[in-house]
């Protein structure tokens, strides 16, 4: 799926059109689907569950489009708030997942030119995801929004109700923890 580029005015126009004609929502869907899907996949780490959640997220957005207020923030932040809440609802309805099994980590690897590179990449991914799972929920959420959802610190701050500087500090500290933990793991 190719991510389309939308200006803020085009986005606002599409939201207004979508309120009157649901078919106009398709352009918003095309624009945000890759980022929402990546964010949800990062958070739930199960493609089938991510598919279901993303479907639910876009249905909720379309059903609740009349509640979106432009003066309160961009459509993207509003949509990521719905995604954030859907992931939270998912975890509330299920037991907290255990650390990522090797089979699932393997699916996260996008290219494997050789068996050696694939094995090394799988070990790196496994180690990284194991360390990410040891971070606090807030740190995991911010990392998911930043790297899975591709959001800026400003958008993450608006979504989570924090200051942009707080997001930067939390992200910096979480990344530092990950680097230290991974470095300690390679020294052994």
Image (cartoon, rainbow, N blue to C red):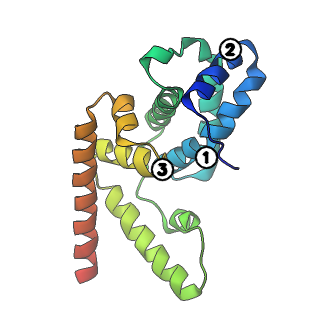
Residue indicated by mark 3: 148
Q: How many marks?
A: 3
Which quarter of the image is occupied by the C terminus? bottom left
| Distance in Å between CA atoms under marks 1 and 3 | 10 Å
Is 114 located above or below residue 163 in the figure? below
The crowd level at tag 3 (other Cα within 10 Å; few <14, some 14-19, many 20+) is many
The answer to which image quadrant residue 23 occupies is top right
Q: Residue at x 48, y 39 (%)?
A: 94
Residue indicated by mark 2: 19
Give the left or right position of residue 97, taking residue 108 as reference: left
| Distance in Å between CA atoms under marks 2 and 3 | 28 Å
Residue indicated by mark 1: 34
Q: Residue at x 66, y 23 (%)?
A: 14
> Looking at the image, is mark 2 or mark 3 nearer the viewer?
2
Give the left or right position of residue 16, taking residue 126 as reference: right
Report helix, strand or loop for mark 1. Answer: helix
Query: 187 or 65, which is in the foreground?
Result: 65
Q: Residue at x 41, y 47 (%)?
A: 146
Query: 126 or 117, which is in the foreground?
Result: 117
């Amino acid at each position: 799926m190719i991510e389309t580029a939308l200006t803020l005015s085009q986005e606002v126009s599409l939201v207004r059109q979508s309120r009157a004609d649901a078919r106009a929502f398709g352009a918003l869907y095309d624009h945000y689907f890759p980022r929402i899907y990546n964010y949800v996949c990062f958070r739930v780490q199960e493609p089938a569950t991510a598919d279901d959640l993303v479907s639910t997220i876009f249905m909720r957005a379309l059903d609740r489009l009349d509640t979106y207020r432009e003066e309160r923030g961009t459509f993207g932040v509003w949509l990521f708030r719905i995604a954030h809440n859907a992931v939270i609802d998912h975890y509330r309805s299920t037991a907290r997942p255990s650390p990522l099994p090797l089979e699932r980590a393997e699916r996260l690897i996008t290219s494997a030119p050789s068996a050696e590179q694939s094995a090394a990449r799988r070990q790196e991914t496994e180690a990284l995801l194991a360390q990410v799972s040891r971070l606090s929920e807030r740190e995991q959420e911010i990392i998911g929004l930043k790297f899975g959802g591709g959001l800026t610190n400003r958008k993450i701050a608006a979504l989570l109700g924090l200051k942009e500087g707080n997001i930067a500090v939390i992200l910096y500290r979480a990344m530092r923890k990950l680097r230290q933990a991974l470095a300690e793991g390679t020294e052994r």
